[in-house]
Image (tube, rainbow, N blue to C red):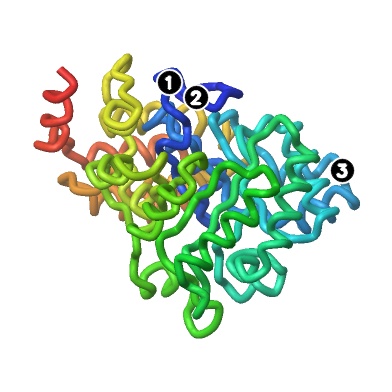
Amino acid sequence: YMGVDTTTERSMSGKLAHTFCVAPMMDWTVQHCRVFHRQLTRHSLLYTEMVAANAIYHHHLRAPDAVVDLLSHHNEHPLALQLGGSNLEQLSVSAKLASQQKFHEINLNVGCPSDRVQHGKMGACLMLQPQIVKDCVHTLMESAPHIPITVKTRIGVDECDSFEFLCDFIARVEQSGCRHFIIHARKAYLQGLSPKQNRTVPPLNYERVYQIKREFPHLCIIINGGIVNLEECQKHLEHVDGVMVGREAYQNPYLLARVDHMIFCDQSKPIPTRKQVVEAMFPYIEEHLKNGGKLHQVTRHMLGLFHGCEGAKQWKQSLSEHAIKPGAGLQVVMDAMSMCVERVSEEDEMCEAAIA
């Protein structure tokens, strides 16, 4: 597959892998999704969905060999593991196991506001306890000394949303040795909003993240939240070190096809067509089916690929209807792809012209 197998901080282009990241998203950025995204971009830093440290810990106690399933990947490097939790022993065990799986980075989730996550003493509620976050990061660093440890957070929680509050939080956690902070440019409400509402209702404040970069110029600051195209990414990169794109990358994944050219300045390979991306997935799908997997487990992450193309609706409908049927195989994907007409967009032509 197309990933850059690297254990270093930099991609082949010399730019930091954090320059462009695909956000960790529950139930979405699983292995099948990441392998699909890797066909579109070689250099972007991909993230697992959040994995709870207590789940890794208890799996390890019950069945040490089975814990690998929780940390499985298909060499989609560069790849980061996002952990959730605040129990130091559980985080330590998780980090040690993760280091054996060759992850590029371990990220601590201090941004998710869901009730379930709060009850597990993880996520955005930890912003109110920076000393605990500092101790968690220190433990992760001691347990996995050769892997960068990063923190993903918000600009504030509830009424604690001042610039001074965020500065104090960053400064305290930095004392652990953490040098990379991914900041979702919205505050989180711990009560009264669903996780989905927390991604849309609190207003975006990109300037607050820019301010943090100016206040802490020695830190690597990555901005996240509401970013929908690569032109926006380029504008953000004038102020911060990296951008993280979430739902837009999942729902309109072909946006990733131009990342290597536009963001990482690597034109060594042409931008793949959508059909080439689908065909590049065939060996992986065949292997998955051979091992007893179901077609829809992979193709559900590919439904947005033909977004904006003639036949996109038929592609989605055909895969959604037929990939779930017993015995569904590659022919289902090929039949769905035959309904799509892919034309070079003005956007892609402009990109190619700029590169030329």
Residue 182 x/y as whole percent: 50, 50
Q: Is residue 117 visible?
A: no
- Relative to 192, does residue 9 appear above or below in the rendering? above
Answer with left or right where residue 337 lies relative to residue 219.
left
Residue 344 x/y as whole percent: 13, 32
Residue matched to label 3 = 64
Give the SS element for disc 2. loop
Instruction: Measure the alpha-carbon separation of dots 3 and 2.
Output: 33 Å
- Please report the residue visible at 46 percent of the width from the left and 38 percent of the height from the top: 329
Residue 291 x/y as whole percent: 64, 35
Residue matched to label 2 = 10
- Please report the residue visible at 74 percent of the width from the left and 60 percent of the height from the top: 86
Split into 4 quadrants, where in the image is the C terminus?
top left
Answer with left or right where residue 320 lies relative to residue 111.
left
Give the SS element for disc 3. loop
Residue 66 x/y as whole percent: 80, 44
Of pointers 3 and 2, the one earlier in the residue sequence:
2
- Relative to 105, does residue 270 appear above or below in the rendering? above
Q: In terms of depth relative to the viewer, which is nearer, 305 or 316?
A: 305
- Mark 1: give few (<14), some (14-19) or many (20+) Cα within 10 Å: few
- Total tally of numbered discs in the picture: 3
Callout 2 amino acid: Arg
Which of discs 3 and 2 lies nearer the camera? The answer is 2
Which residue appears farthest toward the right when viewing the image? 61
Residue matched to label 1 = 14
Which of discs 1 and 3 lies nearer the camera? The answer is 1
- Please report the residue visible at 57 percent of the width from the left and 55 percent of the height from the top: 170
Give the SS element for disc 1. loop
- Relative to 325, does residue 352 appear above or below in the rendering? above
- Relative to 215, does residue 98 appear above or below in the rendering? above
